Image (cartoon, grey):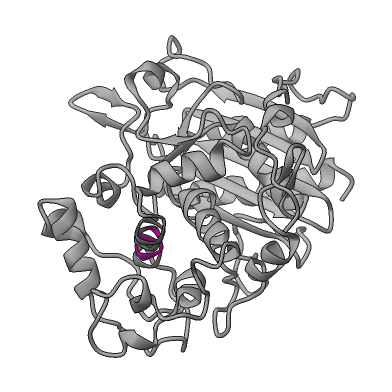
Amino acid sequence: MPPRSGSALPFLLLTLLSCAPGQSASGQSFSEIDSIILAGRDRGVYPAAVVVIGRKDTVLYSRGYGHFTWAQRSAVPDPVQTLWDVASISKVVGTTTAIMLLVERGQVELDAPVQRYLPRFTGGRKAEVTVRMLLTHTSGLRSYVEFFKLAPTRDSAITLLYAEPLRRAPGASAEYSDLNAMLLGLIVEAVAREPLDRFAAREVFAPLGMASTMYRPPDSVRARVVPTGVWNGTAIAGEVNDQNAVRFGGVAGHAGVFSTGADLARYARMWLNQGATPGGHLLRAETVHEFLKPGQNAGPRLHGWEAPDPKEEPPTPYGSLLSPESYGHTGWTGTLIWIDPRRDLFLIFLTNRCFDPKVGRSIRELRAVRDHLSDAVVRATGG
């Protein structure tokens, strides 16, 4: 295994400054990108957004848009300082990366049954479900269960999760499921013998210099967190939006991570560099390659990630111009990350779409913004 430096200093020294509107530090034009994001805000899809665009060794463009809420007196988002509830992007940034590290250390085997690590996961054909199937969403579990309505505590919710029956034969087909990621988070905790947030903070976020990425933001940073909801007229910020993650105490395999545009840029650059960082290696290149393989019978699902599906009708989160090697993930709150190795390109686009949208069907409206934005990023960076 290549040496893994304990120093994150080169990443910590990365200064990500907001560029002048429409223009990168090198003078490259990004005015079309600004127009698309601002149009989405003006239509009422989201009050706040940041975008970060870059390559494996540089950031090309970064900017904040709008305000934390619809009130013009609220804070203006910043790519470096502002924290966002990234929702399902937690599945890759926190959980998948943690599993990758445990695989490299020989503590988790992808084709081992989940029962090896979680003996309470029993019933029906669950003995056939592997860790790999959880990652590729081919376990046979249904997509979503409102555990927060069915269980009053974390422990009782976990009991229901283990008891949830399979709806399809293991490995037969894919259905995107929060339950898969919840189980992966529990595998990390069982194998590492510590909570997921503690393991991820020490083994993933710290080595990458992601100093502002965390679960359960403390009161000291709440002023920097974009709100994702309103309760009795008050904007709610710093509490995870996903209610199942709330029932899990704010830390779950499928949701719970708060991060910034700058930190997610560091994460994307690690993937473009095949696991390498300026301070050493977080992951081996062969591990990165393994997790970017399509899952068997998984359609566009990779291991943790998804690939743009050419059969999907537009609008899609990835537009129509990304290369076949691209991969990414979205989040319910209004977040997007994609990485295109062929073009040496990444996009981070963070919004609080779920905060009091002023337009109906805001998730579909956001898909249209993402679609146009993704194609505009490819055009702006040389196609």
Q: Is residue 77 left or right of residue 274?
A: left
Which quadrant does the N terminus fall into?
bottom right
- Residue under the image location 53 percent in, 49 percent down: 93
Q: Is residue 102 or residue 95 the one in the foreground? A: 102
- Residue under the image location 84 percent in, 30 percent down: 29
**Residue positioned most to the top:** 73
Q: Is residue 304 or residue 365 the one in the foreground? A: 304
Q: Position of residue 129 (x, y in %)?
A: 40, 82
- Residue under the image location 50 percent in, 28 percent down: 48
Q: Is residue 267 or residue 335 the one in the foreground? A: 267
Q: Quadrant of residue 53?
A: top right
Q: Is residue 330 or residue 31 the one in the foreground? A: 330
Q: Quadrant of residue 37?
A: top right
Task: Tell me, yes or no, if residue 1 can be seen here.
Answer: yes
- Total marks shown come to 0
Q: Position of residue 107 (x, y in %)?
A: 49, 66
Q: Is residue 143 left or right of residue 53?
A: left
Q: Is residue 317 left or right of residue 128?
A: right
Is residue 182 inside the magenta stretch?
yes
Range of residues picked out in magenta: 181-185
Q: Is residue 40 left or right of residue 378?
A: left
Where 200 sits versus 34, above or below?
Answer: below
Where 113 sits versus 94, above or below?
Answer: below
Q: Position of residue 50 (x, y in %)?
A: 59, 30
Where 243 sits versus 226, above or below?
Answer: below
Task: Tell me, yes or no, if residue 42 can be seen here.
Answer: no
Where 348 sits versus 181, above or below?
Answer: above
Q: Position of residue 304 (x, y in %)?
A: 54, 63
Is residue 306 inside the magenta stretch?
no
| Magenta stretch: helix, strand or loop mostly | helix
